[in-house]
Image: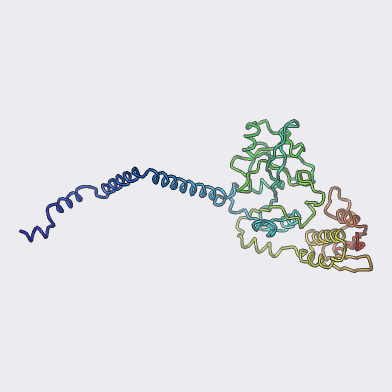
């Protein structure tokens, strides 16, 4: 009998094992632990307060950080098929973080020569003084300067009114029209559908409202919401800086350029094409700058811009595959000759084009600033020769 009792473990142990089998021991243990924890916390209210506050702050901070990262980093652009939209440009070393930027001339070159994209757009953020009327105190507002094809290429249809026409992005400073962001339209104008055709003021300039963007579109930057959109050609009037002509200076790389890939074209194929089509004049201009160091800064700058223009025209319009630059110092004068084997043109017809400031007219204006002379010899099918003679000092 004694041996059997020892083997069974005793009456109390047997009753405890029976109770464990009949109930939910893990739930009972949990309830017991919770009761014990509550009693301990009640005995130490100071410790309890610190622990609860620490947990609340930690959970709140983690939630806020994840929400921030989800909004800014994980969500794609608010445009249809965002995976097809790529950034095109040169890595800028002048910014805090490496980003791809381009000048307007870079954009035009890639837009006209690339075959991998359905379309390429250029845009830039800007801050202006906005006023809904002439007697209203302006307030700072963030918007975007965009090319006319921006909304069609991005696949964004206006919620009200229309987008920009191609002719509204051809002449600098001519077409003062604006599209409003949806949230901006609701906040500033009470979602008034009669806003189309009304005038607002940006930096004191009267702009006509032609459309409102859809609510889902918030711009091209996850960090900043754009309140309005105007044609890129309004850049000189909204951001006046006579020292830097924005549509002529190739080294003024402040534009974002985005392209939508054609169906069936991969990222690797687009990169390969852009690498092969990269304009060769960048290396030539670097050599030219080094050779002109003994000239005055003004002469160096103007001749550099003339050389850029001539080479860009030879590659882009003349379809030349060879460009030769010759420099000849003659006392206090410098002669520069730029020859190409392109298709050529008739100089008189080119110079007669009105409103075209980045062709021969622009080169002649630059050479006049440094009291020099410029001549152009060209014939259809025989290439082009641009020759300048200028003093070394301005």
Q: Please name the residue shown 11% across and 60% down the image.
A: 7
Q: Please name the residue shown 88% across and 57% down the image.
A: 346
Q: Residue 162: x, y in percent? A: 68, 39
Q: Is residue 278 left or right of residue 336?
A: left
Residue 216's place in the image compared with 393, above or below, is: above
Residue 77's place in the image compared with 335, above or below, is: above
Residue 337's place in the image compared with 22, above or below, is: below
Chosen colour scheme: rainbow
Q: Is residue 350 left or right of residue 257?
A: right
Q: Please name the residue shown 90% across and 60% down the image.
A: 376
Please tell me which residue lies in front, 253 or 163.
253
Quarter of the image that includes the C terminus:
bottom right
Q: Please name the residue shown 86% across and 68% down the image.
A: 326
In the rendered image, the residue lying farthest to the left is: 1
Please tell me which residue lies in front, 56 or 333.
56
Q: Residue 205: x, y in percent? A: 77, 38
Q: Residue 79: x, y in percent? A: 60, 47
Quarter of the image that includes the N terminus:
bottom left
Q: Residue 150: x, y in percent? A: 68, 47
Kindly indicate the quadrant of the structure image that contains residue 167.
top right
Q: Is residue 332 left or right of residue 46?
A: right
In the rendered image, the residue lying farthest to the right is: 331
How many numbered marks, from 0 up? 0
């Amino acid at each position: 009998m004694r041996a059997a009792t020892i083997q069974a473990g005793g009456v109390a142990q047997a009753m405890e094992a029976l109770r464990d089998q009949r109930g939910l021991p893990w739930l009972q243990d949990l309830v017991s632990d919770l009761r014990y924890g509550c009693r301990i916390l009640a005995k130490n209210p100071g410790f309890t307060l610190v622990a609860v506050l620490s947990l609340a702050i930690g959970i709140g901070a983690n939630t806020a950080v994840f929400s921030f990262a989800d909004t800014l980093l994980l969500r794609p652009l608010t445009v249809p098929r965002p995976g097809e939209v790529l950034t095109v440009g040169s890595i800028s070393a002048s910014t805090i973080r490496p980003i791809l930027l381009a000048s307007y001339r870079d954009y035009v070159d890639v837009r006209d020569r690339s075959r991998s994209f359905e379309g390429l757009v250029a845009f830039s953020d800007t801050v202006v003084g906005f006023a809904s009327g002439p007697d209203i105190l302006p307030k700072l507002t963030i918007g975007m300067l965009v090319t006319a094809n921006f909304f069609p290429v991005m696949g964004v249809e206006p919620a009200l009114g229309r987008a920009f026409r191609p002719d509204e992005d051809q002449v600098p400073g001519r077409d003062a029209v604006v599209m409003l962001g949806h949230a901006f339209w609701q906040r500033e104008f009470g979602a008034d559908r009669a806003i189309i055709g009304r005038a607002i003021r940006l930096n004191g300039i009267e702009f006509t409202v032609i459309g409102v963007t859809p609510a889902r579109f918030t711009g091209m930057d996850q960090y900043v919401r754009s309140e309005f959109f105007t044609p890129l050609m309004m850049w000189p009037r909204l951001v006046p800086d006579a020292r830097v002509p924005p549509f002529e200076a190739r080294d003024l790389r402040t534009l974002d350029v985005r392209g939508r890939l054609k169906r069936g074209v991969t990222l690797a194929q687009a990169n390969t094409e852009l690498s092969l089509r990269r304009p060769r004049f960048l290396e030539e201009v670097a050599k030219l700058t080094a050779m002109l160091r003994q000239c005055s800064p003004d002469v160096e700058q103007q001749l550099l811009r003339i050389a850029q223009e001539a080479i860009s025209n030879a590659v882009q319009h003349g379809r030349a595959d060879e460009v030769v630059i010759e420099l000849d110092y003659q006392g206090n004068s410098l002669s520069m000759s730029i020859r190409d084997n392109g298709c050529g043109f008739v100089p008189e017809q080119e110079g007669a084009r009105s409103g075209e400031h980045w062709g021969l007219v622009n080169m002649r204006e630059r050479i006049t600033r440094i009291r020099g002379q410029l001549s152009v010899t060209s014939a259809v099918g025989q290439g082009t020769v641009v020759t300048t003679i200028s003093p070394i000092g301005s």
